[in-house]
Image: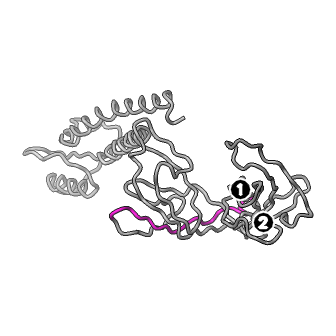
Amino acid sequence: MFSSPWFASIYLLLMISLVGCIIPRMRQHWRSIRAQPPRAPQRLTRLPARADGTVATDGREALAAAREALKAKGYRLRDAEDGDLWVTGEKGDLKETGNLLFHMALLGVIVAFAGGNLFGWRGEIIIQEGQSWTATAGTFDTLNFSPLAGEGDIPTFTVELNKLDVAFESQAEGAQFGQPRRFDGLATVEVPGREPEQQEFAVNHPISVAGDSIFLLGNGYAPIVTVRDPDGEVLYSDEVTFLPQDNNYASEGAIKVTGRDPGLGLVGGFLPTLRIDPELGMTSSFPGLVDPALALTAFEGNLFPDAPAVGLQHRHRPDDPANQ
């Protein structure tokens, strides 16, 4: 949507409208600041708000006191001339200055947004805790370029996820139960030619690398799965990323065990806090690791669809020790 022509036309027209509004107002505001306040009117009755009073002092002393009082309140005074029996001043320039600065900042946001859509790029990658990853075009899970960006715009760097701390609300009741309370971590960033640097990050506090930002978009679980054959030999043992599907982190994942013939595929879900629902079956009732469970369905056959062989075939043999 953000790169579509109709959306681009909207913010381009908005930018043109802002420029057409800001430039004349800046000129008028600049002239107003440099000009002196207007002379006092001959008849004070022309002022919409006025008050009359009498003071027992010399007129010029009263005018001098009035000038000091207006200066103390932040008024910009008109230069006094010989023979003037009045004092005049005005204020409010800062209000208009702030208004113009706001509109200029809004214009800057639109320009930056347009520049990001023309020259920016966006990639996503899943990194497990303790792993490192080097940024190249082929290592991203998803990678999208703007019209004027390419692979050469991706800086070379390596990120190691040292730790990720996650906490969920477990004491509250109702809608607050299970809500995230903390997502923060520590990563080591290494750029060629520089010393490795550790940076803390959180949801709205990205990692800065060579002018680009790495944001934390989400988190999940990667349980260690070990698969053995009937003789107890380890066929597969590794951390497997399971992608969350709901707010309670009921996650889905798949495992390919290539150390046997035919190949073994495992598909299923990881449940941080197992709950058996009469209608939904196995679900998760809390996103934290209270009662974790792994529910998998086994298939055997060809694990690589491009190979000239048949697809996977589901096999369910409860008496097979490999299913336990």
What percent of the width, then of the height, locates residue 118? 41, 37
Q: Earlier in the sequence, mark 2 or mark 1?
A: 1
**Mark 1: which secondary structure?**
strand
Q: Amino acid at mark 2?
A: Thr
- In the image, is residue 32 part of the stretch drawn in magenta? no
The correct choice, above or below, for 86 with respect to 9 in the image is below
Assess whether mark 1 and mark 2 are in contact (beta carbons under 8 angstroms). Answer: no
Residue 256, label in figure:
1
What percent of the width, then of the height, locates residue 262? 77, 54
- In the image, is residue 182 part of the stretch drawn in magenta? yes
Q: CA distance from mark 2 to mark 1?
A: 25 Å
Q: Which quadrant, please, contains the N terminus? A: top right
Return the residue at label 2: 273
What percent of the width, then of the height, locates residue 294? 78, 63
Residue 46 visible in the snapshot: no
The correct choice, above or below, for 8 with respect to 274 in the image is above
The correct choice, above or below, for 185 with respect to 208 in the image is below
Identify the residue shown where x is 60% and y is 57%: 218
The correct choice, above or below, for 166 with respect to 157 in the image is below
Q: Residues within 10 Å of mark 2 (few under 14, many from 20)?
A: many
In the rendered structure, the answer to whether residue 222 lies left or right of residue 65 reads right
* Nearer to us: label 2 or label 1: 1
**Quarter-of-image position of residue 173:** bottom right
